[in-house]
Amino acid sequence: MKAQFVFLLIFSQLFFSEIKLEDLDFLRSLSKADGKSIISSGTSHCNDFFDRKNLTVDYQKYKNFFICKFSKQRNRFYIYMLAVEKKNKGNLKEFCTNIMKNWMIITDHIDKKFMSQKQQYLNGFFVDNLFNDNILNFSKNFNNDQRLINNEIDKFILENRDIFTNDNEKNNQLIEREIKKISNIYRKIINDEVSDLDKVIKNQLDKIVRYKIFINDTKNFISYSCNWKPGKGLNPYVKREKFSEFENI
C-alpha cells in the first residue's frame, strides 16, 4: 500500500510534465516489484512483430526487415532497416522514400493524419495489455476471444502447476485472480478504453520513435542513413552515418 501511495503521489506530479519511459519503469517498480519493464516489453514485442517468421505472406518478398532498439543515451526508440545497397546515381531521398512506401504499417505512422492511431508493433509498450508476458489482441468475435481467454488460463495453469496444492479453495482463488486479470484486459480492449498510463506512453512514443534505413552507396563507397519522425511526412532527413556509429548508442 505504501509503494502504491508513493507511485500515485509522484505520478500525479509528473503526469502533465516531461516524463521518460525510464521514469515510468522506475515508478512501476515502486508499486509492483515484479512488474514487466515497459521498455523491455515494448522492444521485445516490436522485434517479434518484425521477425520474418511472424510476418504475413505479403511481406516475404522483402529481403530486409526492421529491427527495434531503445537507446537510453539518446532517449530514442529506433525502428531501423539494415542495410540497403544503392548502386545507381539517383536521388538518395527518393531512393529511401520508395523503400519506405513498401511498408504501409510504418508510413501510416509517419503520416500526420494517422498520428492518433496506435501501431501494432508498438503495442508492447502498453503494459496494461500484458498477460503472462504476452500482448493480447482480441478480435471482438466473442467465440474466438473466449477460446483465446480459455487457452491463456490453461497455459497459466500448466506453467504454474508447481504452485497448486491439494487445497482446492486456494487453487480456485489463484485461477479466479487470473481470470479477473484477463477479463479486465478484455474489457479494456473491446471498449477501446484508454487509461492515463496509456496516454502518457502514447505521448512519449510520439516524441521518441524514429525510423531509419541504412544505405550503402556502393558506387561512391559512402554510408548514409535516412531518418523519419512520426507525423512529419515521408521526406527523410539524410545524413552520413555508418551503422557502427549507431550500434553502441
Image: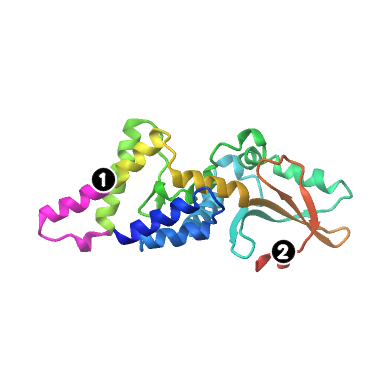
Picture coordinates of residue 98, whole percent (x, y): 75, 41
SS at mark 1? Answer: helix
Q: Is residue 142 above or below residue 158?
A: above
The C terminus, quarter of image: bottom right
Nearer-the-camera pick, 151 or 112 = 112
How far across and down, in percent of the image, does residue 96 sit?
Answer: 76, 47
Label annotation for residue 130: none
**Above or below: residue 7 compared with residue 119:** below
Query: Residue 188 placed where, x, y %?
Result: 38, 38
Please tell me in which quadrant of the rendered image residue 157 appears: bottom left
Task: Report if residue 176 lies within the magenta region.
Answer: yes
Query: Which of the two residues, 109 or 81, is positioned nearer the viewer here?
Result: 109
Read off the residue under disc 2: 243
Identify the disc placed on residue 179. 1
Q: Residue 148: which quarter of the image?
A: top left
- The structure residue drawn at horizontal position 30% and vertical position 45%, both measured from the top left corner, is 151
Please tell me how crowded label 2 is: few (under 14), some (14-19), or many (20+) other residues with Cα within 10 Å. some
Question: What's the residue at 59%, 64% (across, down)?
Answer: 72
Amino acid under label 2? Phe
Report the span colored magenta. Answer: 160-179
State the residue at coordinates (34%, 57%): 4
Which of these two is toward me, 112 or 90?
112
